[in-house]
Amino acid sequence: MFLDFLRNNPLCIILVVMGLLAWAITIGARISSKRTGHYVSGLPGLGGLFILIGFLTSSFKWPALIGLLDLDLWYFVIKVIPDIFKAERAVKKYVPPEEVDGGKVIEYSNYSKEFEELRFLTEYPGSFEIHRINQYIIISKEGAFVLLKTEVNIRIIERISCKDIEECKKLASPKAKWERKI
């Protein structure tokens, strides 16, 4: 009977073995973290998920409940996923303060994950880095306009001086949707 199960459910066996291995790695990482005092990450939640899916693909489904014993899986579903959605909503609703980088905010773009820019590194010829720009901010500073390319927490990636607001908007991404601050 057991041999028939092994022959008829190879995907189940593979997934359950991977799940048990992931559980062992996670437990080993926790023990190592406790002994050394340095945080070591295992594969939290994957062991239970693999076991759950493995038994659900077989003809013998009730052992899938074993996968639900993985507390990391429950923590991920109850705490981590909702926190990701809450943080994303908070970032989308973010409005910059009245003053940024010593200048009065005139207009700003809505938060977006779509703004990316390649920058070639002068110190390493042939190398480049990708900047994820989440928001553009146009400020008035000392009688001139400045376009700020910023990340989520208003970490300024680049400052570009402009003659007027329209020039600043042209230098930003064409996908940017602008809001007026004044």
Image (tube, grey):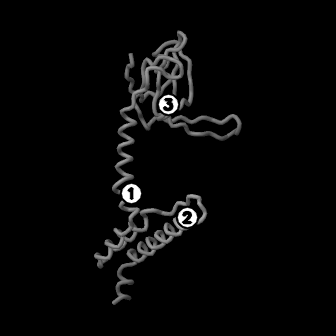
Residue shown at 49%/15% (left/top)? 140
Label 3 packing within 10 angstroms: few (<14), some (14-19), many (20+): some
Instruction: Give the secondary structure at mark 3.
Output: loop
Q: Which numbered tag is attached to residue 142?
A: none
Q: In whole angstroms, how far apart are the C-alphas of marks 2 and 3?
A: 37 Å
Q: Position of residue 14 (x, y in %)?
A: 43, 75
Label 2 packing within 10 angstroms: few (<14), some (14-19), many (20+): few
User: Given this view, does label 1 or label 2 mark the residue nearer the observer?
Assistant: 2
Judge by depth and name the residue closer to the eye, 122 or 91.
91
Q: Which numbered tag is attached to residue 76?
A: 1
Residue shown at 47%/20% (left/top)? 99
Instruction: Tell me if label 1 and label 3 are in contact, CB under 8 Å.
Output: no
Q: In whole angstroms, how far apart are the C-alphas of marks 1 and 2?
A: 22 Å
Q: Position of residue 26 (x, y in %)?
A: 49, 66
- Residue where numbered disc 2 is placed: 34
Which of the 4 image quarters holds residue 40?
Answer: bottom right
Q: Quadrant location of the N terminus? A: bottom left
Q: Which numbered tag is attached to residue 154?
A: 3
Q: Earlier in the sequence, mark 2 or mark 3?
A: 2
Furthest residue to the top?
A: 143
Q: Position of residue 13 (x, y in %)?
A: 41, 77
Is 55 drawn above or below residue 176 in the view shown?
A: below
